[in-house]
Amino acid sequence: MPYSTHPNPLLERSQWRSLNGTWRFSYDDDGACRWPSEVHFDREIEVPYPPESVRSGIHDTGFHKTVWYARTVTLEPFERAGSLMLHFEAIDYIASVWVNGQLLARHEGGHVGFVVDVTEQAQESDTLDIVVRAEDDPFDLAKPRGKQDWQLEPHSIWYPRTTGIWQTVWLESVPDTRISRLQWDSRMDRWEIIVEAGIEGEPRSDLSLRVRLSMEGQIVTDDRYSIVGNEVSRRISLPDPGIDDFRNELLWSPNHPTLIDATVELLAGNDVIDVVKSYCAIRSVDVQGNRFLLNGRPYYLKLVLDQGYWPDSLMTATDEELRRDVELIRQLGFNGARKHQKIESKRWLYWCDVLGVLVWEEMPSPYRFTTKAVERLTAEWTCIIERDRSHPCIVAWVPFNESWGVPDIPTNAAHRDYVRALYHLTKTIDPTRPVIGNDGWEHVATDMVTVHDYADDPAVILRRYGTLESTRVSLEQQRPGDRVITVPGFEMVDQPVLLTEFGGIAFFPGGELGWGYSQSEDENDFLDDYTDLLAAVHGCNGLSGFCYTQLTDTFQEKNGLLYEDRTPKADMLAVAKATQGPRTAREMTIDPAMNPFGYSLRWRKRSGQTRQDEVAMPGTD
């Protein structure tokens, strides 16, 4: 597929422009200012970097409850015709937006975006005066906040806060009647693509939707559907490719991240009034007995814990940095990532789709159980599922982690019911993916039993999970974090068991402050410790996969395979070999387009970086 630069590659139009860059900025610590006219903008900030970050130009990590942004935009002629939408990908936590003096929007939730219709303002003036007020109480533990610390300095496993705008802002010119929503799904058993589209604007009786799917420039289907009301849902049948070799080429997987290009047109009669670019894929994920299935076959998960922080920009990254992280995940031998306590930019999910990285998407936690906390998390989580469920890379949803926000699961029925409710709600919205109700321990509802175990002795790991029987005993007897793994009343029925946090081996130069769950003395020692531990995990027949802690050092946590700046701590090929383990040979189909670590040469061709014959193998210069 052609390389995309759009902030939302699943619903891409040609007429858009980024509003990232220099904005006026002000702190309002006591929240005294209620209207833009009351604010004195006394400094500048580089959007979308949060004011706590170095790249923002401010780098103030203190406590600030309310911040203000302002920018005046001179409109292009095409932005004054039709409708104009102002997109915010994420503002933490409560945002109010004024345009040309009018309050147009108020949005709550720091991890999903929202859209403001500024058509009227654009038609009345050739400029937009945009003002944003963001309220983000640093001490509020009842809102979904993930790893953002409530103390002044980062401590333990928590990191600097992120306040205000922290993801892309952009303007998009759209037709008055338009495609407002596009969702993709697939049925591998029937070779079907399912498309759902929502239509917004003036109701018309002559509307139809044309969907063209293509692969490598060749048209696969070209269908047209009448629209009744404001939405359409259709199943598109593709020809069965026949034998497994052809099927495997067409199915999306980490070894073959095959994407299908989509062009979707909205027509009034025979006139095209809107057109968007998108993509989809055919793949299935499921759980059967004690195995995770990808495309109908047992698949061993080799995930890495990814916090999604950068030293100079905190939770915000450039597109190049997001792509590089995905490439590094593959180069280190992993086939997936558990994005931990963060909802990442849609650009990161795009690169996981393109480059073939499986994703466990996890909801950032609050740290109190209150009615307000329940309402907030539930509302935001449902929006996240709707936003991201078209991405083929996502193979599991994780609404809770380690009982954060539900600390009394064993003794409080309301806490147990809440986890069960989110588990079933998630499966109701998206019945096509497994759901892990509460990752790590105290399971009450889950499709896979996951365990967090930081034992640093490989022999201990083998003893606990080496066989199905020893794993069953360990699940009954282990108390990681002084927590039971399964709560009485939860019945295990041969679900897959995965070690979804382990390792955390620290290695960092002398004189630095930091910690890990164990520590190596030097680079050779670090590589040996990692190799031995991964060999033990690969030897555990009671496990169906793992997630190693973690991809990079993250502030005081020095237990990454990479330093914070993404330079490796040890030879990457040696790390990849240990990560892959002995299962590689029977899991992979080697062909001339693959190297031994499953890195498809077609990825870079698809991403527009270089020609296929120019690609170097991972770990080489």
Image: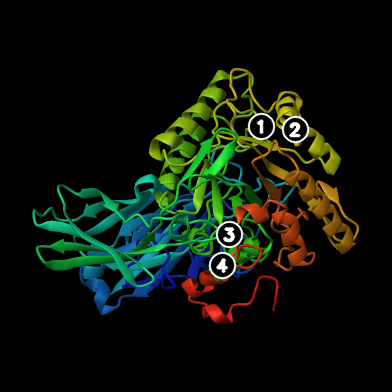
> Is the C terminus in the top left, top right, bottom left or bottom right quadrant?
bottom right
Find the distance from the CA under tag 4 to the CA under tag 1.
36 Å
Residue 600 image label: 4
Residue pointed to by mark 3: 589
Q: Amino acid at mark 4?
A: Ser
Find the distance from the CA under tag 1 to the CA under tag 2.
8 Å
Find the distance from the CA under tag 3 to the CA under tag 4.
11 Å
Identify the residue at horizontal 80%, vertical 51% (top origin): 505
Residue 441 image label: 1
The mark lying in front, picked from 3 and 2, is: 3
Q: Is residue 109 visible?
A: yes
Find the distance from the CA under tag 3 to the CA under tag 1.
35 Å
The mark lying in front, picked from 2 and 4, is: 4
Q: Tell which of 233 and 82 is nearer to you.
A: 233
State if disc 1 and disc 3 touch (CB < 8 Å). Answer: no
Indicate which disc, 4 or 1, sits on the residue closer to the N terminus: 1
Q: Secondary structure at mark 2?
A: helix
Residue 415 location (% of width, % of height)? 56, 25
Residue 40 image label: none
Residue pointed to by mark 2: 480
State if disc 1 and disc 4 touch (CB < 8 Å). Answer: no
Circle 1: is it few (<14), some (14-19), or many (20+) Cα within 10 Å? Answer: many
Indicate which disc, 2 or 4, sits on the residue closer to the N terminus: 2
Indicate which disc, 3 or 2, sits on the residue closer to the N terminus: 2
Position of residue 116 in the picture relative to residue 529 (left or right): left
Residue 558 location (% of width, % of height)? 78, 56
Q: Secondary structure at mark 1?
A: loop
Q: Amino acid at mark 1?
A: Trp
